[in-house]
Image (tube, rainbow, N blue to C red):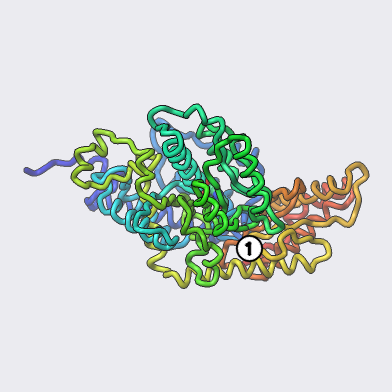
Amino acid sequence: MKTIHDSSLDEWFLTGTPLSQAAHQQAINTAQQTIETHFSTANKPFSGIQAEELSNLLEDDVICPEEGVPLATTLHEVGQKVLRHSVAVHHPACAAHLHCPPLIPALAGEMMVSATNQSMDSWDQSPSATLLEERMVQWLCKTFGFSHQADGVFTSGGTQSNFMGLLLARDHYAWTRFGWNIQKRGLPPEAREMRILCSEAAHFTVKQSAALLGLGEEAVVTIKTDEDHRMNLEDFNQKLSHLYGEGLHPFVIAATAGTTDFGSIDPLPELASRAHALGLWLHVDAAYGGALMLSNTYKKQLQGIEAAHSITVDFHKLFYQPISCGAFLVNDQNHFNRIKQNADYLNSTEDEALGIPNLVGKSIQTTRRFDALKLYISLRSLGRARFADMIEKTIEIATKTAQLISKDPVLQAINPTPSLNTVVFRYLPNSQHSELSDSQWHDQINHDIRHTLLASGDVVLANTKVKGRVCLKLTLLNPRTTMKDIEFILERIKETGKQRELPRGEWGQHASNISATSNHAKLL
Ligand SMILES: *Cc1c(COP(=O)(O)O)cnc(C)c1O
C-alpha cells in the first residue's frame, strides 16, 4: 500500500523530498553565514552593551506575529541582536568561568543530534542512540577505573549528576541502614539526622541537592580546606567523630576533583579508604577535573576515584562540548533500581523481560537528548593525545600566568601554583580611600575592575571571594590562549585598577573612555 504524505509542509519539516531538503539547506546555510559573520566581527569577548539597552533592542520584535516573518529575516535579526551581544566564548579574553569554546566536530554532531531528534528514554525512540550512549558509558566507566558492574547515564551537567549521586546515596543508606524504602515511603524518621560531608570549597549544588532531597541545607557539614584548598583530613576526622558522638547519621562524602575556584582535588585515596571502612558512600564531583583522565601526565592526580560509588563528569567544560553534556556514573548498576519507574507506555516490565534496553530507568529526565553523540564524534576525530595536549597546555598557561602575577608588584597571586587552569588573584591599590577601610577599598576596586572590563567588552573575567575577600579569577580553559593574550588581559586589569584609584570625578570620565582607548586588535 502506498502512503500519501501531505507535502504542503515540506518547507517546514526535514523529510526526504527535494523541496524539504532544499529548504533545510537554505536555512542551515543562512544560519551558518550568520554565525560566521558574528565570529568574524566579534573582535572583543563582549559588545559591552548594558542590560537596559539590550532589553529595549529585543523588545522591538513581535515574538509570535499572526503571519510569520521570512526565516532569513528572522535569522538575520537574531544575528544582529542576539549573537552580536552574546559573549564570544572562543575569544581568549573570555576567561571568567568554566565556559568552553565548543569543538567543530561537536558542532557537526549537534546538527545530527537535532535533525534526527532521538529521545533517549526508550529503545523505540532511539535504537542506535541507546546503544551508542551505553557504549560511551562503558568507555567512561573503564576510563575512570570502574569494574564491569558499573553503569551510568548522560545528564544535563554537574548539577543533575551531583543531585543523582546524593539521591542514590541517600536512598541506599536508608535502605541498608534502616530497611526503609524512600522511593515508596518518603523520608524516614531519621532523615533529620542524616548528614552529608563535603569541603568548604565544594560546589554549591551539594547544598542545593540537600535541600531538594528534603534533608535541608543544614544536613551539609563542611570540612575545612588546607592551604591548597583541599579537604583537610584532620578536620574531616574530627567532624566525623563528632557526628557519630551526637548519634547522627553521616552517609555520604561528597569529594571534589577540581573545585570551581581553585581546581583543587580532595585527597581521594584517603577519603575512599575512610568511606569503605565506615560504610559511607563516596561521591566524587569531577565535573571540572574529570578530563585529567585523558592526560597521561595528570591522571595520577585522580588516583582513588576508581574507589568511588559515584562520579560526576562534565563534558561542556574541559571536553570542549557545546552545552549541555555531562554524565553520572555509578560503580554498581543495581543502584539505579532505587530511582527506577516502569511506565506501561514506555518501558513495560514485559518489554524489559525481553531484554529491551530502555534508558529511562537510569535517568531523572524522561525525554532526553542524544548528547553522547557529539562527545563520541569529538573523541574519535581528535583522539586522546590531542585532547590531552590541549588540557595540558591550558594548565601550563595558567601556571605561567600565576608566575607573572606573583612577580607583579600591583597584583597578588592567591594560588601561585594552580592545580588546574584557574588563576585567582587581587589587584593591590596603591592608594587609600577617604571613607573606606583598606580592606573595603581593596574589595571595592577588585569588584569594580571586573564590572568596568565587562562594560568595556574587553575582558570577561570573574570575581570570587576567598576568606571573605573579593578576588579576580581567570579560568584559562581555552587551549588557543597564548601568553600574549594573558599579557594583554593583565595590562587591562592593571590599567582599570589604576584608573579606578583616581579621584571620583576623574574616574567617571576615564571609565567612559576606557573602551575607546584600549587596543582590541592586539588580541586577534
Ligand atoms: C560546573 C560544576 C558543577 C555544576 O555543573 P553544571 O554542568 O553547571 O550543572 C558542579 N560541580 C563542579 C565542581 C563544577 O565545576
Question: Of 370 and 459, which appears nearest the observer?
Answer: 370
Position above or below: 348 against 310: above
Disc 1, SS: loop
Q: Residue 332: x percent and y percent?
A: 38, 50
Point 80% across, 55% down: residue:
497
Q: Residue 516: x percent and y percent?
A: 73, 56
Q: Residue 55: x percent and y percent?
A: 60, 38
Q: Quadrant of the C terminus?
A: bottom right
- Whether residue 79 is visible here, answered yes or no, is no
- Whether residue 18 is visible here, answered yes or no, is yes
Question: Of 294 and 501, which appears nearest the observer?
Answer: 294
Question: How many numbered marks, from 0 up?
Answer: 1
Farthest-out residue, left = 1
Q: What's under tag 1, amino acid-wise?
A: Ser
Question: Of 56 and 344, which appears nearest the observer?
Answer: 344
Q: Residue 259: x percent and y percent?
A: 60, 54
Point 55% across, 52% down: residue:
274
Point 56% across, 56% down: residue:
257
Q: Quadrant of the N terminus?
A: top left
Residue at numbered disc 1: 419
Position above or below: 51 against 413: above
Position above or below: 19 against 8: below
On the rendered structure, is 63 left or right of 11?
right
Residue neighbourhood size for the residue with mark 1, other residues' Cα within 10 Å, grouped as few (<14), some (14–19), many (≥20): many
Point 55% across, 60% down: residue:
90
Q: Judge: label 1 CB < 8 Å from ligand 1.
A: no
